[in-house]
Amino acid sequence: MDKRNWKFSRFGVLLLFLLYRSFILCWSLNDEGLALLKFRERIVSDPYGALKNWKDEDGVVDPCPWFGVECSDGKVVILNLKDLCLGGTLAPDLRNLFHIKFIILRNNSFTGVIPEGIGKLKELEVLDFGYNNVTGPLPPDLSSNLSLTILLLDNNSLLGNLSPEIQQLKTHSEFQVDENQLDCR
């Protein structure tokens, strides 16, 4: 292969790599943005207008500039909407925030169950649903999340048993489930 063809071939490979990387980044942003928009659809009360900038701009769903959302390398890593008096139900789409490290929804009026699949978020370190109206049992997959270091579910209406695996979280993390109806078994 002569030098000219070799340079063209290297340029082509580099161009394909950059296009692929851009596609993956855009896909991730859109996927995470769509998950957050689904979450937004379930909010029926936003008295302070905190989520008014959560919208689809010309088909591009980039959640990084949205209120309460923080990103790293274009990926959503923090969702912090504490103390906003938001009301609604927790969307199962939260489980699609694959790079999320912190979900903080403390002191709002969220109802319903903790979405199944939240425990499968492998990078999740902090889950704070304290002081809401969350009901039902804890999702079983929550106990298998090894990265979870802070679990705050205090002052809700959770029912059921705390599995031994969930109780193990107490040994290496901050763990609050008081003011619920949970039994240790």
Image: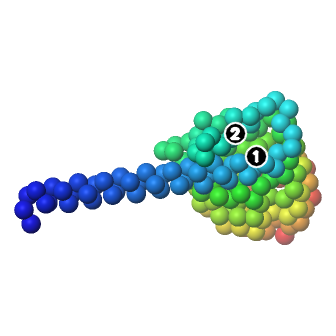
The quadrant of the rendering that contains the N terminus is: bottom left
What SS does tag 2 mark?
loop
Q: Residues within 10 Å of mark 2 (few under 14, many from 20)?
A: many
Q: Nearer the viewer, residue 46 or 71?
A: 46
Is 185 placed above or below 179 here? below
Q: Is there CB contact under 8 Å for labels 2 and 1?
A: yes
* Amino acid at circle 1: Arg
Name the residue rendered at 7%, 62% in the picture. 2
Up the image or down, 24 lies above or below 63; here it is: below
x%, y% of residue 79? 67, 43
Residue visible at 84% across and 70% down in the picture: 185
Residue beneath label 1, please?
40
For residue 135, the mark is none
> Looking at this view, is 14 or 134 the one in front?
14
Return the residue at label 2. 54
166 up-or-down from 133: above or below: below
Q: Tell whether 143 sits left or right of 178.
A: left
**Which residue is farthest front?**
58
Q: Secondary structure at mark 1?
A: helix
User: Residue placed at 35% from the left, 52% from the top?
Assistant: 18
Q: Position of residue 35 (x, y in %)?
A: 68, 53
Amino acid carrying mark 2 in the image: Trp
Of all residues, the one furthest to the left in this rendering is: 2
Q: Is residue 46 visible?
A: yes
Of the numbered discs 2 and 1, the one sitting upstream in the chain is 1
Indicate the quadrant where residue 123 lies.
Answer: bottom right
Quadrant of the rendered image containing residue 82: top right
| Residue at point 69%, 39% (across, down) | 54
- Position in image of residue 76 (x %, y %): 59, 47
